[in-house]
Amino acid sequence: MTEIRPHASHWGLFDAITENGRLVGVRPFAQDPVPAALIESVPATVNSAARIDRPYIRKGWLEGKRRGHLRGGDPFVPVSWDRAIRLLAEETARTRAEHGDAAIYGGSYGWSSAGRFHHAKSQLQRYLSLGGGYTFSVNAYSYATAQALMPHLLGTNEVFLGRMTDWAAIAENAKLMLCFGGLAAKNGYVTSGGAANTYGPNMRAAVAAGVKMVNISPYRADTEDALAAEFVPIRPSTDTALILAMIHHIVSLGREDRAFLTTHCVGWDRLAPTLTDKTPEWAEGITGVPAVTIRGLAERCLAQPTMLTAAWSLQRADYGEQPYWALIALAGVLGSIGKPGQGVAFGYGSSGGIGNPRREMPSLSLSAARNPVSSFIPVGRITELLERPGGTLDYNGRVLNLPDIRMVWWAGGNPFHHHQDLNRLLRAWAHPETIVVHEPWWTAVARHADIVLPATTTLERNDIGHSSRDRFIRAMHQAIRPLGQARNDHDILADLADAAGFRDRFTEQRDEGAWLRHIYGRWHQACARMGFDAPDFDTFWEEGHVELPPVERGQSFTQFADFWRDPEENPLDTPSGKVELFSETIAGFGHADCPGMPTWMEPREWLGNAAADELHLLSYQPPTRLHSQLDPGPIAARDKIQGREPLVIHPEDAAARGFEAGQVVRVFNTRGACLAGIRLDDRLARGVVLLATGAWYDPLEPGVPGSLCVHGNPNVLTPDIATSTLTQGMSAQSCLVRIEAWEGPLPPIRAHVPPTIEEMPA
Ligand SMILES: Nc1nc2c(c(=O)[nH]1)N[C@H]1C(S)=C(S)[C@@H](COP(=O)(O)OP(=O)(O)OC[C@H]3O[C@@H](n4cnc5c(=O)[nH]c(N)nc54)[C@H](O)[C@@H]3O)O[C@H]1N2
Ligand SMILES: Nc1nc2c(c(=O)[nH]1)N[C@H]1C(S)=C(S)[C@@H](COP(=O)(O)OP(=O)(O)OC[C@H]3O[C@@H](n4cnc5c(=O)[nH]c(N)nc54)[C@H](O)[C@@H]3O)O[C@H]1N2
Ligand SMILES: [Mo]
C-alpha cells in the first residue's frame, strides 16, 4: 500500500512516500517555488547499510582501555539496550560524583535534524542540565568570528543571521551589489529547520529590478549564471587589502562622507592615518586584482546606491575579523549604513532564506533547562579543551578555565566532520575516559566513540519543522517504523533520566504527541498575541503545514534605518552608540592578532607565502549534501570520482602538474593527507583548489594519527588555529596543500559500511 506523508528537512520540505511500511521515495512540497533537489538522497540514506542497528560499546572501553587510548581502531561489541542504559547511567553518575559536573563536555555542536522537538542537541542539553550540568560551547562553526565581533562594532548580530536589510529593499533601492565570496546558489538549498526555498528567486528579482551584481571571489561559479554577475577573481584571504585600498581611493578623491563619519561612526580619525599607504597598487600585489579594477569598484560605489555583502566563508579564515570590519568601514566611508536598501550585511549567499522579506513571528522550539555549570569554550576550541586540562583560554576579554574533561557526549553533530586538523583532534580525543555518541549512522564520530546509541531518523518519528526565515510551519509525520533497534533521542534520555531519578522533570510527563501539542500550543498563543490566528493543532497536523501571511509589497525592511535617520535618538548598542571603526574595547584587550581597527595582516597560510608547488585549498560547503549528512545518498555518489570527493582545479594548474580529469591524486601538507579525484574547472582562479567538506572521514588505518583519508575529507588538511584571540573563530579556509599523483591501487571506501563488530560474552 502506498502512503504519502508531509515531512521536512534542513534541505527542503517534502512528502515521504512509503510502500508497505518502507520508505521508497520522496517528492517536493507542492508549494515550494524551488523544489528541493537534495531530497532525492533521503530514501537511500535512511535505508543505508551505514545505519546503526543496535547499541554498541567499544571493546577496548569494556576492557578498561579508556583515558589515553587512541580511539577509532577497536572493534565494537553489540549490547542490549538495557545494558547500554545501565552502564551509561552508572558511568555518568560516577563521573559527576568523582570529578564534578564540569567534567562532562556536552557542547554537542551540530545541525542535528529539522524537527524542533526531537532536535538531538537540545534534547541532550536539557537532559544534561537537569542532571547537574555540563561544560558547554558557545557560537557556531558557521560564523563564530562574527558572533563575537559584531556586538563590538554594530551592537548586534542581526547583521549576519537575523532580520537584516531584505532583498525587497535591495531590489527597490540599490543599483550595485558587491558580493565578496559571491552568492553561491548551492548554499541556498539548505535552511536550518527546513524551509520552502525562496533563495534564488529573491536575488534574481533584484537583478531583474536593475541591481548589478559583482562577484568578488576566487570562483566564478559563486554566482549562478542567471545573475549575469561581473566576476572579479581574488586571492583567498586577501579581501581586507582590497577593501582598504577602495577606502584609500575614495579618500584620495576627497569623497569620504565626512558628515556621516562624524555623526554615525567613531574612530575615523584613528583609522584614516593607517590607510595612507594602502594604495590600489599595494593591494594589487596582495590580492591579484588590478589597481584599475579596485579604483573602478570604489568609484562605482560612490556613483550609485550600493549594497555591500560578504559570505560567511570570509570570516572562517585566519584573521577572519578583518574583512568584515573593513567592509563595515567602507560602508561608513560611503555613509550608507541604514540608507534604504544600502549599507552592509553578511551571508546573503550563505544559507536559504537569508534576506527573505519576513515579519517578526514567534519561533517554535523545545523549552531549554538552565545549566548549573558555567564553564564553556568557544565551539572551535574543542581540541584545546582536551589537550590542556587545567589551562586557560582568552576569549572576548575574558579568561576561561579549561576543565579536565572525563566524559564527552555528542548527539546531533559530528566533530570528525566539522573540526579542523582531524589528526590533532584524534590525539586529543584520547583524553576523556568515556565518549558517548547518539547517531543514526556509523559516521566518523560514532566510530570514534565508546558507547554508541542508535538514534532514529526524522522519518521514524513525529515532529514539527520550522525556520524563522520561512513562511511555512511543517508537520513531520512519522512515515516508517524505527529501523533495527533505533530509538528517539528523547526516549533514550528519558530512560537515562529515569535511572538518575528525574524522569518526570525531563519528560514533564508528556509523550511525543503531548510535547508536539504543547510546543505548538505555546507558539499558537504567541501568534495570537501578535495578531495572527493560527489554526489549531489538529487542523495543522491534518493539513500538513501552516502558511504565515506573506509580507506585503512595499513593506521592505532596511536594517539600521532609524539609526541612519537620527543616530542620537536611535543609537546602536555599542559603547559609543555609533559604528565603531575603532573600538576602544578591542584595542584595550591588547591582542596583536586583532588590533582596534581593521588591519591587513598576512595570514599564516596564503598564496603570498606559498611555495611554487603549493595551492590554496578552500574547503567549501558541498553542493551534494548538507555537511556530512546525505553522503551515503545517490547525489553525492554520482558526483564522486572513482568514489573520491572531487578536487576542483583550474585546467592550467592541472596541466602544469601533469594531472588529467578523473585521475585520483593525493592531497597533502604537514598535517595530513587524503585522496581526491581531479575535476577541471576554468571558472576557478589559478592557484586555488576546492575540496568540499563532508566526504566521511575514512582513514586507511583507523585510529592511527596521520593515516591517509582515502575518501577526501579536507579536515585532515585544514589548520586548527583561532582566527584571533578575541573571537577564537575557526580558520578552515586558510590552508595550503600540495598534490601528487596516486600511483598505488585504490583503497576501498569503508566509511559507508559498519566498522568491525565482534561478539563478546555478556
Ligand atoms: N574544512 C571545513 N570544515 C567545516 C566547514 C568549512 O567550511 N570547512 N564548515 C563548518 C560549518 S559552517 C558547520 S555548520 C559544520 C557542520 O558540522 P555538523 O553540524 O557537525 O555536521 P553534520 O554532518 O550536519 O552533523 C550532524 C550529525 O547529526 C546526526 N543527526 C542528524 N539527525 C539526528 C538525530 O535526530 N539524532 C542524532 N542523535 N543524530 C542526528 C547526523 O547523522 C550527523 O552525523 O562544519 C564545519 N566544518
Ligand atoms: N548545499 C549546501 N548548502 C549549505 C551547506 C551545505 O553543507 N550544503 N551548509 C550550510 C552552512 S552550515 C553554512 S555555515 C553556509 C556557509 O556558507 P558560506 O560560508 O557562504 O559557504 P562556502 O561554500 O564555504 O563559501 C562560499 C564561497 O566563498 C568563497 N570564498 C572562500 N574564501 C574566500 C575568500 O577569502 N575571499 C572571497 N572573496 N571568497 C572566498 C568560495 O569560493 C566559496 O565558494 O552554507 C550553508 N549551505
Ligand atoms: Mo555552518
Image (cartoon, rainbow, N blue to C red):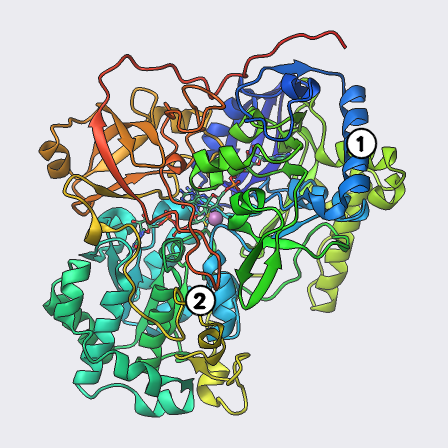
Residue 331 position within the rendered picture, expressed as x and y whole percent measured from the top left: 34, 76
Q: Nearer the viewer, residue 525 or 575?
A: 575
Query: Looking at the image, is mark 1 or mark 2 earlier in the sequence?
Result: 1
* Secondary element at tag 2: loop
Residue 17 position within the rendered picture, expressed as x and y whole percent measured from the top left: 57, 26
Q: Which mark is residue 761?
A: none
Question: In the picture, residue 343 is in which quadrant?
Answer: bottom left
Residue 184 position within the rendered picture, expressed as x and y whole percent measured from the top left: 34, 50
Amino acid type indicated by mark 2: Asp
Amino acid type indicated by mark 1: Ala
Q: Is residue 49 left or right of residue 349?
A: right
Q: Is residue 743 above or below residue 153?
A: above
Q: Nearer the viewer, residue 633 or 63?
A: 63
Mark 2 is surrounded, within 10 Å at the Cα level, by few (under 14), some (14 to 19) or many (20 or more) other residues, namely many
Q: Nearer the viewer, residue 514 or 403?
A: 403
Residue marked by disc 2: 166
Residue 237 position within the rendered picture, expressed as x and y whole percent measured from the top left: 29, 56
Q: Is residue 434 above or below residue 385?
A: above
Residue marked by disc 1: 89
Q: Is residue 664 left or right of residue 518?
A: left
Mark 1 is surrounded, within 10 Å at the Cα level, by few (under 14), some (14 to 19) or many (20 or more) other residues, namely some
Q: What residue do we see at 38% from left, 26% from top?
A: 709
Q: What residue do we see at 18% from left, 27% from top?
A: 661
